[in-house]
Image: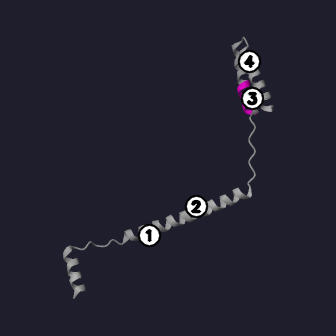
Amino acid sequence: MRQEENFRRLSQSIVDAAEVANKDEARKAAAVVVNSIGTMVQPKRSERPTAFSTAVDTLGNAIKAAREAKFARVRNNKETNAEKPEAAKSLAELLAESAQDSA
């Protein structure tokens, strides 16, 4: 009901501003109308956190931290393995090793 009253006043102000014959007065009235729009908006109240939403946030933060730790470990393992490249063995070396293993 309060919003309807505010909108009625706003629309009436717009109509009054449009009815002014003098352009300068119309501009001033329009500026007043436009500037008054911001004052009619009331900010929403923030919601109180419930026990459930607090628990969900805590669980979400724990999962996020665990993922970040896992990605850091995987990244470190990849960097460590990339620093130790194994030399590719030729076919002759592989055959010689297999012959030594057989003997």
Residue 18 within the segment the image draws in magenta = no
| Residue 32 picture location, percent across and down | 74, 24
Say above or below: 62 vs 19: below
Q: Which residue is mark 4?
A: 15
Local packing at callout 1 (Cα closer than 10 Å; few below 14, some 14-19, many 20+) is few
Q: Specify start and end residues of the magenta stretch as a single range.
A: 32-39
Q: Find the residue positioned furthest to the left.
A: 92
Quick one: SS at disc 4?
A: helix
Mark 4: few/some/many CA within 10 Å (<14, 14-19, 20+): few
Along the polypeptide, which appears first: circle 1 or circle 4? 4
Q: Residue at x 66, y 58 (%)?
A: 57
Q: Which residue is mark 1?
A: 77
Q: Quadrant of residue 61?
A: bottom right
Which quadrant holds residue 6? top right
* In contact (CB < 8 Å): disc 2 and disc 1: no
Q: Residue under circle 2? A: 64
Q: What amino acid type is highlighted by mark number 1?
A: Asn
Distance between mark 2 and mark 3 Cα atoms? 45 Å
69 lies left or right of 48:
left
Measure the C-alpha gap from mark 1 to mark 4: 71 Å
First-in-chain label (2 vs 1)? 2
Which numbered mark, 4 or 3, is in the foreground of this view?
Answer: 4
